[in-house]
Image (cartoon, helix red, strand yellow):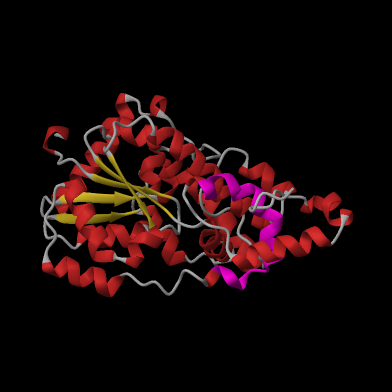
C-alpha cells in the first residue's frame, strides 16, 4: 500500500513563521492538496513525551508504516493528489520526518525572531476552544487519545477556570521548556522557542545533500511573492499556474512585519542574548529602536548589569 504513496511535500518552519502561507501557495496547484498540521499523528512514536524533540531512532518500522499509511489515505480521500504537509513543531524533528519520508521534497522557512516573539507571546494568551480541540483530535490515533485528554483539559482549566494569563504550554516544546517555565519570564521562554529550534534545524539540515532543501526567509517571500512562488514550484517539480500567481499577490501581505513594536524595547534588550547568534546566522539586522534601547540600558549603570541587563552591543561595544 505504501508504494502507491506519491512523494509528499514537507514544509519545515517554526510556528508563526510563514509555513501556512507557503502551504497555501503550493496547494493552489490543482495536483496538490494541503494537510494542515496533523500534529498528533507525528507524535505517534511517543505521545507521552514531554518535549517535541524526535530523531531517526524514533522512526521505527511500525511508526513509518503507520504515518505513511495515514498520508496515503489522506491522498486517496483527496483525489489522489500530492500531499503538502506542515506541522511547525516538526522543526525539532527533522531527522525523524526525513526517516519516515526519505523521498519527500523539503522546504524550510524562517522568520525574524522579533516578529516571532511578538506573535507567539500573544498565542500563549489565546483561550483554548472546544472546537479547536475536536479538530486536533481528528488526526489522533484512537488508541492514544488518553495521552491528550489530560493535557487539553489542563489548558481549558488554566484559561477558563483559573483565568491565568498564559496557557500551561504553547508552541514548540524544546528540551528544558518545562523547567524554564518555572524559572524564567515568558519572553525569555518565547525567545528560546525561536532560537533553540533554529539552531537544531541548522544542524539537522546540514545532513541533507546540497539543494535538497529549499530555504526561504518569510520577509523575502512577502516582499516578492510571485518570484518566490516560481522558485518553490521549480524546487518541488511543479509549474506555477496563473491562478497561483494571482493567489500569491492577493494572499501574501507585508503589513504584519512591524507588529513586534508593540513590545517594550527594553524588554527585548533583556532577551537579546537568547536570539543574537541565530538572528545573525539568518542575516537579520538589529533595528535602530533596539540599538537605542541597548544604549539606554548601558547608561543605566552597574545596577542593571547586576540584574541581568549586561549584553554584547551589536556595533562591537562591550
Give how far across and how far down residue 54 sits, in percent.
45, 34
- Answer whether residue 251 is magenta in the image: no
Q: Picture coordinates of residue 268 (x, y %)?
A: 66, 60
The answer to which quarter of the image holds residue 244 is bottom left
Q: Residue at x 19, y 63 (%)?
A: 28
Give me the residue at 30% from left, 65% from top. Answer: 224
In the rendered view, would you say 137 is above or below 246?
Answer: above
Q: Position of residue 250 (x, y in %)?
A: 27, 75
Q: How many marks?
A: 0
Residues drawn in magenta: 260-280
> Is residue 136 or residue 292 the one in the foreground?
292
Q: Is residue 238 visible?
A: yes
Q: Quadrant of the N terminus?
A: top left
Q: Nearer the viewer, residue 60 or 158?
A: 60
- In the image as oriented, which residue stretches furthest toward the front? 316
Query: Camera-side residue: 96 or 221?
Result: 221
Q: Does residue 140 appear to the left or right of 184 in the view shown?
A: left
Comparing 5 with 159, the one in front is: 5
Q: Position of residue 40 (x, y in %)?
A: 40, 46
Determine the main secondary structure of the stretch shown in magenta: helix
Where residue 106 sits, quadrant-wise, is: top left
Which residue appears at 63% of the width and 48% of the height?
Answer: 274
Q: Is residue 103 left or right of residue 238?
A: right
Q: Indicate whether 127 appears above or below 318.
A: below
Res. 150 visible in picture: no
Does residue 247 appear left or right of residue 114 in this picture?
A: left
Residue found at x 13% / y 33%: 3
Amino acid at each position: 500500500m505504501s508504494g502507491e504513496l506519491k512523494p509528499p511535500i514537507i514544509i519545515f518552519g517554526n510556528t508563526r513563521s510563514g509555513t501556512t502561507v507557503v502551504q497555501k501557495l503550493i496547494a493552489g496547484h490543482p495536483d496538490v492538496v494541503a494537510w494542515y498540521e496533523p500534529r498528533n499523528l507525528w507524535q505517534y512514536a511517543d505521545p507521552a513525551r514531554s518535549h517535541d524533540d524526535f530523531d531517526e531512532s524514533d522512526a521505527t518500522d511500525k511508526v513509518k508504516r503507520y504515518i505513511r499509511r495515514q498520508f496515503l489515505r489522506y491522498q486517496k480521500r483527496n483525489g489522489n493528489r500530492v500531499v503538502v504537509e506542515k506541522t511547525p513543531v516538526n522543526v525539532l524533528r527533522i531527522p525523524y520526518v526525513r526517516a519516515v519520508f526519505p523521498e519527500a521534497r523539503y522546504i524550510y522557512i524562517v522568520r525574524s525572531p522579533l516578529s516571532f516573539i511578538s506573535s507567539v507571546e500573544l498565542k500563549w494568551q489565546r483561550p483554548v476552544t472546544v472546537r479547536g480541540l475536536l479538530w486536533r483530535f481528528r488526526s489522533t490515533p484512537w488508541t492514544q487519545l488518553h495521552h491528550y485528554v489530560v493535557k487539553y483539559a489542563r489548558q481549558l482549566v488554566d484559561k477558563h477556570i483559573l483565568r491565568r494569563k498564559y496557557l500551561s504550554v504553547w508552541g514548540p516544546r524544546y528540551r528544558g521548556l518545562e523547567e524554564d517555565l518555572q524559572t524564567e519570564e515568558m519572553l525569555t521562554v518565547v525567545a528560546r522557542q525561536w532560537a533553540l529550534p533554529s539552531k537544531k534545524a541548522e544542524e539537522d539540515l546540514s545532513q541533507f545533500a546540497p539543494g535538497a532543501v529549499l530555504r526561504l526567509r518569510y520577509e523575502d517571500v512577502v516582499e516578492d511573492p510571485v518570484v518566490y512562488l516560481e522558485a518553490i514550484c521549480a524546487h518541488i517539480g511543479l509549474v506555477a499556474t496563473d491562478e497561483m500567481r494571482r493567489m500569491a499577490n492577493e494572499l501574501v501581505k507585508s503589513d504584519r512585519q512591524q507588529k513586534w513594536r508593540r513590545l517594550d524595547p527594553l524588554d527585548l534588550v533583556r532577551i537579546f542574548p537568547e536570539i543574537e547568534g541565530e538572528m545573525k546566522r539568518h542575516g537579520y539586522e538589529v533595528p535602530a529602536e533596539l540599538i537605542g534601547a541597548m544604549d539606554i540600558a548601558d547608561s543605566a549603570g552597574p545596577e542593571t548589569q547586576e540584574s541581568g541587563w549586561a549584553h554584547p552591543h551589536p556595533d562591537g561595544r562591550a
